[in-house]
Amino acid sequence: MLRILLINDTPKKVGRLRSALVEAGFEVVDESGLTIDLPTRVEAVRPDVILIDTESPGRDVMEQVVLVSRDQPRPIVMFTDEHDPKVMRQAIQAGVSAYIVEGIQTQRLQPILDVAMARFESDQALRAQLQAREAQLAERKRVELAKGLLMKMKNCSEEEAYTLMRRQAMSRQQKLIQVAEQVIAMHDMLGG
Amino acid sequence: MTDHRTTPRADAQTWVAGSDAPEKSSINLGFMPLTDSASLIVAATQGFAEPYGLSLNLRRQVSWSSLRDKLLSGELDAAQGLYGLIYSMQLGIGGAPATDMAVLMGLNQNGQSINLSTPLRQAGVCNGETLARHVRQSPEKLTLAQTFPTGTHALWLYYWLASLGIHPLEDVNTLVVPPPQMVEHLRAGRIDGFCAGEPWGAHAIDQGMGFTVATSQSIWPDHPEKVLGCTRAFVEQYPNTARALVMAVLEASRFIDASEENKAGTAQLISADEYVAAPRQVIEPRFLGNYEDGNGHAWRDGHALRFHGDGEVNLPYLSDGLWFMTQFRRWGLLREDPDYLAIASQVQQLDLYRGAAGALGIPQPASPMRSATLLDGRIWDGTNPAAYARSFALHSMGEVPSADDQGTSPCCASS
C-alpha cells in the first residue's frame, strides 16, 4: 500500500482529502500543515508520495517543494483551486509531478497517483542521465587540462602525458581524475 | 540485422539525429574479484571510456551465479563473463531460462590454474600421472571445486582429468565454490583441489595450502577465457553504447599489454580492496608470467595471461564459442546437438567488434576460426563441432548416437 504524507494547506482544520484517500484505500501516514518544515517531515515519515492540498500555492509552499525535490525526491501531487497557468508552471518547475485543479473524486485518485508516480520516475531517470553526462564532461575537461600542463612541464607528447598520469594513478590505486586534480593543484601551487 | 526502429529507445533524439554517441551514458559493469578482470578495472578507472561519452560503474559480484542473475534482471548492463557462463545462459542450461546473449569481445586468454591440496602432495601426488594413480587406488573419491557448473574452470578441469583417464563426473566429486573462497575451503579440508582464475591458485601456495598441478594454458595454449558479455537485447537497444564500451576496453587492454611497467602498475591497482582484494605480491608474479608451482618448480610462462596480444586475444572467434558448446554436449549438459554454428554466429558480435577495432586501428585476424592443439594432441579448428563433441573416449553423452552419428563413440564412458 502506498504511504502518503498529506499536507493540509487550507484554513480548514480537517482537510477535504483525508477521507477521500482513506476511502480509496490509501494509507495516510501523516497529516500536517505547512507550518511544519516539510523536508523534516519527509525525512521522518519517508512517504511514497506527498500530497499537498492548497487553495492557492504561495511562495512558502513552492520553496518547500523545491527543497524536497532537491534533497529527498518524491512524487508530489498538488490539489488546488488555483487556475492561473503561471502558478501551475511554477509548481511544475518546483518539482510537482501532478497539478490537479478542483474536484477531488475518490475514484480518480488512483489514476492520478499512478500518473504522478510514472512521471516522477521518468523525470528522475532523465535527471540522473543528465547529471552523469555533466559530471563526465567536467571530468574530461579536468583530465585534458592536467594532460596539457604535464605536456608543458615534462615536455612530452600527449600519449606520454596520459601514460605518466595513469601509471601514477595505478600505483596509488586511484582514478585518473584524482591524479589529474593533483597535477592541477601542484601546478597552481608552483604558480605556473 | 535487427530493426532498431521497432524497439523503444531511451534516447530517441540521439537516434533520430543519427549520432553515434552512446544512447546510455553511464552503465553498470559487473566483475568478479579475479586477476583477469584487470582490463575492465583499468578501463573504468583510468579514463578510457569518458572520451567516448561513457562512464563505467564497476560492480563487484560475490559469485558467478549472482552475476548471471543481475545481467538478466538488468541490474548489470554488461559484465565480465566466463565463456561457458554466457553460452549456458544462451542455451538455458545454467540454472536460468534461455535468454539471447551477446559476447562483445574476448577479454583475456590463459591465466587459470588447477591446484591440489598440501595433504595430497604429502600423499605422493605431484602431477597428473600420480593423481590418476591416487584416484584409481584410493577408496575415497576426491572432491574438486570449480567456479560455475558450465564455466570455463569446470571445463578445463574436466578436460584435464579426462586426458589422464579420470572421468570427472564419475571418478571424483565436483562442486561449485566462488573463487575467493577456494583457499578457505582447502584450509578446512572440504575440498582436495580446485580450478579457478588467479590470484587464487597463487594465494593457495602463498598460504601453504596447496600447489599448482596444471595451468590452463598447459591444457590449451592461448585458450579463450573471460568475455565481455551482455544480453542481446542490450546490444540491440544500445548499439552505440556497446560499441563505445568495446572501444574503451580494447584501449585499456592494449595499454596493459604495452609494457611490463604498465602490467606491474595494473597489478598494483587491481590488488586494492574494492577490486581483487588480494596482496600485490600474490597477484603480480603470474600477472607478469613468472610462475612458481609451490612444489619446487619455477618457470617463465610463454603463454601467460594476456589481454590484447595485438588484437589476437579480443576477436570473438566463432571457433571459441563453438568449443564450449561441444564440451557441454560431451559432458551431457546438452542432451542433443545444438545448431552449433547458427548459435555461435548470433552470440559472437563479430560485426560490432570489427567496427570498434577498425576505428582504433587494431589488427584483426581475418578468419573467425582459429586452430589450436590441446594437451592430448587433439586439434580444434572449429570444423564439424558435432563430430568433435562425440570423438572423446571419456564423456557423459549416454548411449545417444543420433542419426547423423559417425559411429566414433560407441557408448557410455569407461576407462
Image (tube, coloured by chain):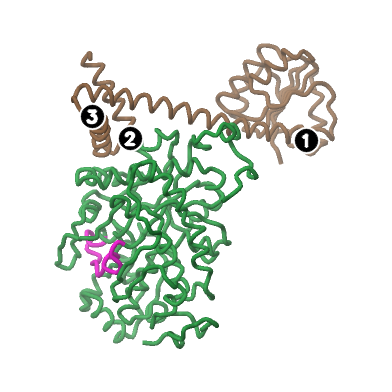
Chain colours: A brown, B green
| Picture layout, residue B199 above or below residue A114 | below
Marks 3 and 2, how far apart at CA: 21 Å
**Same chain? Circles 3 and 1:** yes
How far is the residue under mark 3 from the one under mark 1?
Answer: 61 Å
Please tell me whether mark 3 sits on a helix, a strand or a loop. Answer: loop
The span shown in magenta is: B204-222
- Which mark, residue B209? none
Q: Residues within 10 Å of mark 2 (few under 14, many from 20)?
A: many
Residue at 39% across / 87% down in the picture? B414
**SS category of the residue bearing label 1:** helix
Q: Earlier in the sequence, mark 1 or mark 2?
A: 1
Q: Amino acid at mark 3?
A: Ser
The dot on residue A175 is 2
Q: Which residue is mark 3?
A: A157
Disc marking residue A111: 1
- The subunit letter for the residue under badge 3 reads A
Query: In the image shown, does A98 or A150 lie closer to the viewer?
Result: A150
